[in-house]
Image (cartoon, grey):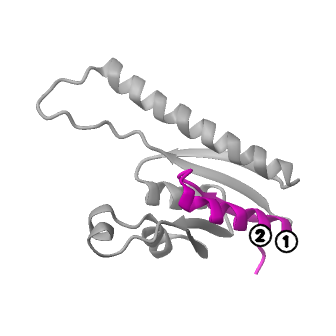
């Protein structure tokens, strides 16, 4: 199996840091390109029956994209400091489907993603992005616990 392109999906949380470290190690070991990816959170909070202006929706969407870009840029800079071939990418939509779409778009040979380790009711209510990625990804997925 050839691994020349690794997609690391990050939500910039503390739980994703071990996955980023391992993704960098794997990229060095395999001399692979590392793609640092984030699915920008562009979901508008619901305000009941209140009106949300299109301007506010655009502002919230743009703020989410800017936050995602800053986070990706920070991780790309850290990987470059390790002399890894790296590029950043941002997607939109539900995290799991955006990660899988990015893996297909960039023809990733592996996805490295962190897990929060939720269980029970919290997992049912919040869901598991990593689990959905594992079930639908076009390539092997390495999950790394916090």
Side (left or right) of 83 relative to 12: right
Cβ–Cβ below 8 Å for labels 2 and 1?
yes
Side (left or right) of 28 relative to 55: right
Q: Foreground residue, 60 or 98?
A: 60
Side (left or right) of 93 relative to 102: left
Magenta stretch? 1-28
111 drawn magenta: no
Q: Where is mark 1, residue-wise?
A: 29
Q: Which mark is residue 26?
A: 2
Residue ID at (66%, 56%): 106
Q: Residue 81 in the image: state x and y as whole percent.
A: 85, 49
* Count of numbered labels shown in the rendering: 2
Does residue 81 show up? yes
Q: Which mark is residue 79?
A: none
Q: List the single residue furthest toward the left.
A: 49
Side (left or right) of 25 relative to 124: right
Q: Foreground residue, 31 or 144?
A: 144
Q: Residue 96 in the image: state x and y as whole percent.
A: 45, 60
Q: Residue 86 in the image: state x and y as whole percent.
A: 77, 51
Residue ID at (69%, 40%): 73
Disc 2 to disc 1, C-alpha distance? 5 Å
Secondary structure state at the residue bearing disc 1 = helix
Looking at the rendering, in which quadrant would you find the N terminus?
A: bottom right
């Amino acid at each position: 199996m050839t691994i020349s392109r690794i997609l690391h999906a990050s939500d910039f949380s503390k739980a994703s840091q071990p996955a980023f470290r391992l993704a960098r190690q794997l990229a060095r070991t395999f001399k692979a390109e590392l793609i640092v990816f984030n699915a920008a959170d562009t979901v508008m909070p619901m305000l009941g029956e209140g009106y949300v202006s299109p301007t506010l929706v655009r502002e919230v969407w743009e703020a989410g994209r800017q936050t995602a870009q800053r986070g990706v840029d920070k991780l790309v800079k850290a990987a470059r400091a390790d002399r890894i071939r790296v590029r950043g990418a941002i997607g939109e939509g539900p995290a799991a489907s955006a990660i899988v779409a990015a893996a297909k778009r960039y023809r990733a040979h592996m996805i490295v993603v962190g897990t929060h380790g939720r269980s029970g009711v919290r997992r049912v209510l919040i869901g598991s992005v990593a689990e959905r990625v594992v079930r639908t990804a076009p390539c092997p997925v390495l999950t790394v616990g916090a």
